[in-house]
């Protein structure tokens, strides 16, 4: 007897939590050279389709499901979302990075880099804290940083919020890097400074692309 399977296919990053994305990424890392395995793992983690059933899909269903998922995974223009509500509490993104508390800055930089990995939920719990007041013209205040990371809460937040925050820092870093390189002169800085910054820029760019590199061949 033919078994009917009901799938819930995410149509955007707003339908995928960080917890689900991390689980998928870890599994895909072990099979990243095998396109069919990567596709099957996508279907399993994002749509709830057991791997054993992937081979039983019709070609049309297989391609349609794959196309639905890949249709938004190349989007790198997700905006920064200043507010996110978790368990009925509104959290706001650090409103003034230049005046960020030293403790918050120190804890973020201790992670060495910004990337969607096991440390990302901790970084988000530092950047997003409960809103304490809202004023005119979009101004707002958030709870002072106390060193406590409620990072488990952010595992359930959707990937459009997470990627929006990541891309914000990527664009900010690249703009800063380009400005610095364009304004430097040989007499003001050590001779190897430009090379150091250029290498740093390459690392930033790599971090920028890393979320999308899990599925590059599947788009062909």
Image (cartoon, grey):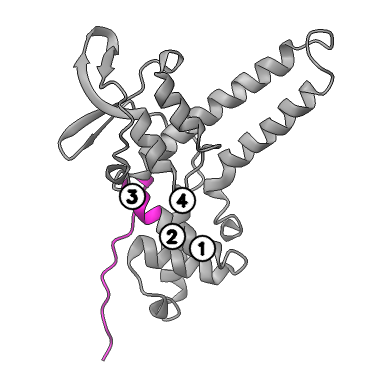
Residue drawn at (23%, 8%) of the image: 136
Q: Is residue 2 above or below residue 103?
A: below
Q: Are marks 2 and 3 in contact (CB under 8 Å)?
A: no
- Cα separation, mark 1 vs mark 3, equals 16 Å
Front residue of 176 and 78: 176
Picture quadrant where residue 220 is located: bottom right
Is disc 4 in contact with disc 2, using a CB cutoff of under 8 Å? no
Element type where label 2 sits in the image? helix
Q: Residues within 10 Å of mark 1 (few under 14, many from 20)?
A: many
**Image x and y of residue 89, in percent:** 18, 33
Mark number displayed over residue 17: 3
Above or below 95: residue 15 = below
Cα distance between the residues tagged 4 and 2: 18 Å
* Residue 196 vertical position relative to residue 64 in the rendered view, above or below: above
Residue position marked by numbered label 1 in the rendering: 28
Comes first in the chain, label 4 or label 2: 2
Instruction: Indicate whether residue 18 is drawn in magenta.
Output: yes
- Whichever of labels 1 and 4 marks the residue nearer the N terminus, that label is 1
Q: Secondary structure at mark 3?
A: loop
For discs 1 and 4, the disc positioned in front in the rendered view: 1
Check if mark 2's residue and mark 1's residue have beta carbons within 8 Å: yes
User: Which residue is identified by label 2?
Assistant: 24
Q: Which residues are magenta?
A: 1-21
Q: Which residue is mark 4?
A: 71
């Amino acid at each position: 007897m033919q078994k009917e399977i009901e799938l819930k296919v995410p149509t955007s990053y707003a339908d995928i939590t960080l917890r689900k994305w991390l689980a998928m990424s870890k599994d895909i890392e072990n099979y990243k050279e095998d396109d069919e395995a990567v596709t099957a793992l996508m279907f399993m983690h994002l749509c709830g389709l057991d791997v054993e059933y992937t081979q039983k899909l019709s070609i049309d269903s297989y391609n349609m499901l794959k196309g639905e998922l890949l249709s938004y995974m190349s989007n790198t223009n997700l905006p920064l979302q200043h507010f996110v509500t978790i368990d009925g509490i509104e959290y706001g993104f650090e409103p003034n990075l230049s005046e960020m508390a030293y403790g918050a800055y120190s804890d973020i930089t201790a992670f060495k880099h910004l990337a969607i990995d096991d440390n990302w939920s901790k970084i988000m719990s530092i950047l997003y804290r409960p809103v304490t007041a809202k004023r005119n013209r979009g101004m707002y205040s958030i709870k002072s940083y106390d060193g406590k990371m409620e990072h488990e809460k952010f595992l359930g937040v959707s990937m459009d919020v997470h990627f929006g925050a990541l891309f914000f820092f990527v664009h900010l870093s690249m703009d800063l890097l380009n400005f610095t390189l364009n304004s430097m002169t040989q007499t003001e800085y050590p001779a190897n400074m430009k090379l150091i910054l250029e290498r740093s820029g390459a690392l930033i760019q790599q971090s920028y692309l890393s979320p999308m590199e899990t599925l590059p061949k599947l788009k062909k």
